[in-house]
Image: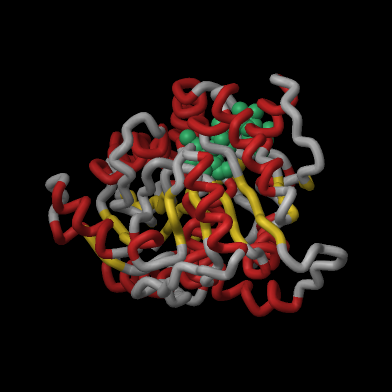
Amino acid sequence: MRVLHVIGARPNLMKAAPVFRALAKQPRAQQNLVHTGQHYDANMSGAFFPQLGIPEPDVNLGVGSGSHARQTAEIMTRFEPVVRQRKPDLVLVYGDVNSTLAASLVCAKLLIPVGHVEAGLRSFDRAMPEEINRLLTDQIADLLFTPSEDGDANLLHEGILPAKIYRVGNVMIDSLVDMLPKAIMWKLGSLPERYALITLHRPSNVDDLKVLKSILEALLEINTQLNVLFPVHPRTRQRIAEWGLTTGKLHLLEPIPYLEFLALQRRATVIITDSGGVQEESTYLGVPCLTLRENTERPITVSLGTNTLVGQDKKKLSAELSNIVAGKLKKGFVPPLWDGHAGERIADFLCRFF
Ligand code: UD1
């Protein structure tokens, strides 16, 4: 069984690593990693491989940044000859980034089976580029590995055959469970006892001057009662610089490696984010999370977990934050099958399937 994993953007690495490691224990599995190069800065990509215990990619397509059309087309053009040459039995794609859709489209046309890991998630907001990637990838993938019950329901509602759907749990949480003991040991040095940890990169939050300015103002206000630690995504850093926005005494950091970021998350008083993965990780860790989005493709983090959607409503953000600072916390639970074994379930399934 020859499996080719496609990764492109930072969160793909945490999702692919547990599947890669579980398949490595199966004698019949031969594996290759293809990195599209969608993310290319060392601290957005290269730094993660050794921490996650997976080898460097066999192939890097080096596509880099660009508009959605250019980036997607470039990945397709560069990926097609790799698939033709390697003739895998299965291509595994992860999450909802442009690399996920581009690789799936190439394989669908070449009649190479595709497995989508983290299938079925829906925000029902088609203004989000990731929602388009999710919808289309799930329509053309052959095997759909879902993290939670809502994923199955969404796929069935879209007419996907039940026989293609396998609920395996959350692979991102596998990486977290694996790394948590090391993160617990991590010395956070001179960090404040209580802090708010921020991540921000969604186009709807950072590509609009008024919105980004208003979020930064809200963060500056929060910083007066709770230290704000803000590892800044390259997209966000570019916008702040381009528009000359004030970040005052906010503690801005470069994007940080996975282990250190986990250590920061588990000790945070509150996490304020627009990331998908961070909503899940904070739910697992039981840390309060305020999500700066109107909707989420991970509703289970709100219904069961510690996540609260605050959108772009400054008043709601401030009210929720005051509750958290005062110790009035939303009670959360870890969703079923978020247990550190999703990658193994995928590997077991594939070995039976092939
Ligand atoms: C992408 C994904 C998003 C995911 C995020 C994780 C899509 C549509 N979006 O968003 O779902 O949550 O990754 O981080 O696939 N840049 C660098 N260095 C890098 C990478 C990016 O400087 O290593 C800059 C480039 O100027 C680029 C911009 O950041 O134009 C945005 O990168 P891009 O890959 O287009 O999207 P992300 O915002 O990272």
In the figure, 234 relative to 118: above or below? above
Q: Residue at x 53, y 40 (%)?
A: 314
Q: Quadrant of residue 259?
A: bottom right
Q: 158 left or right of 260?
A: left
Q: Residue at x 66, y 40 (%)?
A: 233
Q: 183 left or right of 175?
A: right
Q: Residue at x 71, y 54 (%)?
A: 225
Closest to the observer, 221 or 107:
221
Q: 152 left or right of 211?
A: left
Q: Name the quarter showing ligand 1.
A: top right
Q: Quadrant of residue 262?
A: bottom right
Residue 75, horizontal then vertical, whole percent: 49, 31
Residue 125, horizontal then vertical, whole percent: 32, 36
In the figure, 230 relative to 81: above or below? below
Image color mode: secondary structure
Residue 342, horizontal then vertical, whole percent: 41, 71
